[in-house]
Amino acid sequence: MAKSDITGKRKLSAQNVSHSNIKTKRWQNVNIQTRRVWVAEYKRYVTLKLTTRDIRTIDKIGVLVYAKRHGVKV
């Protein structure tokens, strides 16, 4: 299953709605990327499955701060 290692985000159930308002089930998938992230405190890379929003936030505040915010140990 595609799921973010830090936030736990995964696919959601949604509906297609036609012009005549007929609703059919579908999935909204999360954009999961496998990335090697440098952790300066450990002086090594860590491979994680992350959403693209996770990647943007990690670039801004750092992986350990972001993981601590979500209660996950890296």
Image (spheres, helix red, strand yellow):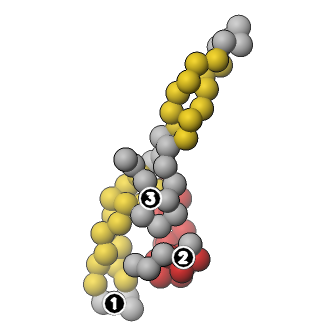
Q: Which residue is mark 1?
A: 42
Q: Earlier in the sequence, mark 2 or mark 3?
A: 3
Q: Kindly identify the residue that appears in the image at 71 percent across and 13 percent down.
A: 21
Q: Looking at numbered disc 3 in the image, what kind of residue is underneath it? A: Ser
**Where residue 59 is drawn, which disc sits there?**
none
Q: Quick check: 74 left or right of 8?
A: left
Per the image, the residue denoted by label 2 is: 71
Q: Identify the residue at horizontal 33%, vertical 59% (top origin).
A: 34
Q: Quadrant of residue 69?
A: bottom right
Across and down, in percent, residue 60 comes to 54, 74
Q: Between tags 1 and 2, which lies in front? A: 2
**Corner quadrant of residue 68:** bottom right
Categorize mark 2 by other alpha carbons within 10 Å: few (<14), some (14-19), many (20+): few
Q: Quadrant of residue 15?
A: top right
Observer able to see residue 62? no
- Residue 53, above or below 6: above
> Relative to the observer, which residue lies in front, 5 or 56?
5
Q: Which mark is residue 4?
A: 3
Q: Disc 1 to disc 3, how far (Cα)? A: 21 Å
Secondary structure state at the residue bearing disc 1: loop
* Residue density around tag 1, few if under 14, some if 14–19, many if 20 or more, within 10 Å: few
The answer to whether one can see residue 5 in this image is yes
Q: What amino acid does circle 1 point to?
A: Tyr
